[in-house]
Amino acid sequence: MTRLRQCWPKRLLHQLSLLLCLALVASHLIGIVLLHHHGSLLHPLSRNASLERLATAYHAARDLPPGQSSKLLAHMGNRETRFWVARQPEVEPFSPRAEEQRLANDLRSRLALPAENSLTLQLERANGANARSHLLSPAGWAPLQLRSSLAIGNGLFLNAIQHPSGAYQWGSVLAYSLPVTTLPVLLVVVFCISRVLRPVKSLARATERVSRGEWIAPLPLAGPAEARELTHAFNTPLTELRLQVELLEPGEARDDMLESLEELATMLRETLGFVRDDAVQEPTRRIAIEMLLGELTRRYGMLGHTLTLGKRADVYLYCRPLALKRALTNLIDNALKHGGTAQVDVNVQAGMIVLEILDQGPGLPEAWLEKVFEPFVQLGHGNGGLGLGLAISRACVQAHGGELVLENRQPTGLCAVLKLPQSLEDPKCLV
């Protein structure tokens, strides 16, 4: 096994080429075995010629005087064929196989012989072995021979031994079929794989350079769609940032940043999905609301922001955690931006889990409390974003069977009220 691993090619192109060649050889061998055991052993032209010679010899032996028939039968013979008349049949009656029975039926039909006339044909190998001997044995590759005995009356039999051509002369078949089928397919595969591997090799070299701390320009988009998508993903700042984080010393801070990057990447994919009206559906699971808010509090604290947990309730909810976290993050970011600090209260009211995100900002004009939920709508000049944050938050909450509204506080501030059904215990209930 160790020697086999050493001989196995290292490059993907060479591995796939070798596997393709092995697969083609295996498919040919399987085809040979199936044809040998179930296909017609005789070539159609050789089969017809053998039966025609038998029919001619039968008429000559039956209708001509013995001297003339003997000369004609001798003239019809050659190195591979022999006809003679004798009182003993060359082939004794036996239980014929399917192909032998078809040969006998065809010959009987050509000669218009009644059923009582003795007619026996046996197809075998020239060494006397079964015609369908195992291919791995020498007997399975020996030439075919057809022995036959036909009653011609007066206790005489027309005997014959012929060597018809097989339908599958495996040496010739493989000598042509393997190169003809393998070379074109191999060339096409090598071309396609090379086209795919070129951008992958570029990515590998670029990754190595980034690992050494070098700055690299965005890679050109080339190759098939999958390679282009991979290169595009590498060119994004998020991917480069992840590569840089991977170079940090292992520890809790590094793991936390990697987790944050993974969540950010998922949120980005779902945000783009929202823009395309093709949102990604993550699996639903049961979580503790307090645990989710605790993670957000710790995360914002590491960023230097003040997020306070006010009223609390020990409740659980079946939800899509990343989607819900994205909705809360959008609302908390708005509160921090406009109020400097944010507070989250959790209550249970009339079977609903109510989360309130409170800030001390100036609030919103009444006419804007609903309008800001529309996609691409921003109050004033905005902050350089797309105006999707609140639209995404409401879409996520509504997908969980809840509702999200904004309310002005007195004397100042804004409250985002997020309501989710507490009775939602079966994830199948989610829209």
Image: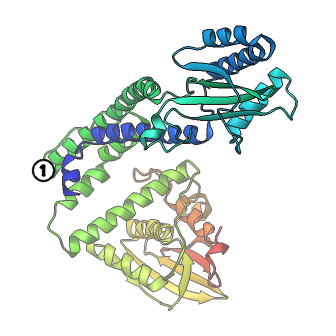
Question: Where 191 falls versus 238 (above or below)?
Answer: above
Q: Say which quarter of the image contains residue 149.
A: top right
Question: Where 421 falls versus 126 (above or below)?
Answer: below
Q: Nearer the viewer, residue 192 or 187?
A: 187
Residue 46 image point, x, y percent: 62, 20
Q: Residue at x 43, y 37 (%)?
A: 24
Question: Where 205 falls versus 76 (above or below)?
Answer: below
Q: Residue at x 65, y 73 (%)?
A: 428
Is residue 303 visible in the rendered structure shown here? no
**Quadrant, the C terminus:** bottom right
Q: Amino acid at mark 1?
A: Gly
Q: Residue at x 65, y 35 (%)?
A: 122
Residue 333 image point, x, y percent: 41, 66
Q: Nearer the viewer, residue 148 or 35?
A: 148
Residue pointed to by mark 1: 213
Q: Say which quarter of the image contains residue 217.
A: top left
Kind of element beneath mark 1? loop
Would you say 28 lies left or right of 300 here? Answer: right
Residue 119 image point, x, y percent: 76, 32
Q: Nearer the viewer, residue 112 or 187?
A: 112
